[in-house]
Image (cartoon, rainbow, N blue to C red):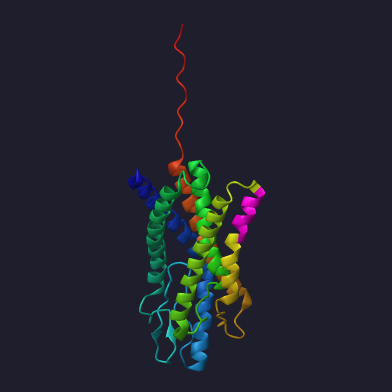
Amino acid sequence: MITRLLVRGMLAGLLAGLLAAVFAYAVGEPQIERAIALEEAAAAGSDAPAGGGGHSHAGAPAEDHSHAGTSGGGHSHGEGALVSRGGQRFGLFLALALYGVALGGLFALVYAAVRGRAGPRSAPVLAAVLAATAFATVVLVPFLKYPANPPAVGDPETINQRTVLYLVAVAIGILAAAAGTAAHRLAAGSDSALRWAAAGAATLLPVAAAWIFLPEIAEVPAGFPADLLWDFRIASLGTQAVFWLGVGTLFALAVRERTTAPPAPAPA
């Protein structure tokens, strides 16, 4: 049974990853191109490398646009890059497909662990609730504190610090979901309103603490177009929303109970 669920989860994740890649390509890629043009223009104007480092296309696998040095000392995303833009676009689909397979399998294992112990009793509804919870905890909570940035934003020397802080925010989001679930179960003897109030407070407390105590990272250069930054971040968040919506929907369809019509009465 676990093996069957795992396979279904991995297939759902693969398809959801490809759907997310299509969204990222259609909605996010134009913002990437605009940001790259700004980065290369700034590098050509200053005759020095532009800041950036790794940048994420979807808040998940980082799409590292190659920064090969040019004769002018700047960065190249075109013919002189270590990986061409075409190769980077193919890498987007490959990365999100592999990302989907991995997270889809993990999603199926979590589903198997909580089924019958927590959450709705209906299998499709439980799958949808788990997908929504995963989006909130591993995407939305860290995104609110550390949103994705396009090329030309970010100091390469702080990339390790940014990565660690982002992973800490993800861990806090998961902790918040676990705390909310535990509080809801502990208040099982209380009325429904109190149970949900306890769950909400237990969920929001670690999130609020993270918002207050985790350090800020403000590396957007002065004069960077606000509309480009906003559009890139919306595309990044939208890619993850499409992915988790796909995982929840496809897995719910995969685990729905198949009902059979009652046999027709025999003729008299």
Judged from this view, the residue extending furthest toward the top is 268
Residue 195 within the magenta-colored segment of the rendering: yes
Residue at 44% x, 11% y is: 266
Judged from this view, the residue extending furthest toward the right is 193
47 in relation to 168, above or below: below
Q: Taking 56 as reference, is 188 left or right?
A: right
Residue 179 within the magenta-colored segment of the rendering: no
Q: Main secondary structure of the magenta part?
A: helix
In the image, 236 versus 121, the foreground residue is 121
Judged from this view, the residue extending furthest toward the front is 189
| Residue 258, horizontal then vertical, whole percent | 44, 34
176 in relation to 188, above or below: below
253 in relation to 157, above or below: above
Q: Taking 187 as reference, is 123 left or right?
A: left
What quarter of the picture does the N terminus occupy?
A: top left
Say whether residue 262 is visible: yes
In the image, 194 versus 151, the foreground residue is 194
Say whether residue 242 is visible: no
Q: Taking 177 as reference, is 105 left or right?
A: left
Residue at 51% x, 41% y is: 121
In the image, 78 versus 88, the foreground residue is 88
Q: Which residues are magenta?
A: 193-201
| Residue 20, horizontal then vertical, whole percent | 47, 59
265 in relation to 205, above or below: above
Q: Taking 259 as reference, is 98 left or right?
A: left
Residue at 47% x, 93% y is: 47
In the image, 129 versus 24, the foreground residue is 129
| Residue 39, horizontal then vertical, whole percent | 51, 83
| Residue 257, horizontal then vertical, whole percent | 45, 36
How many labels sit on residues? Answer: 0
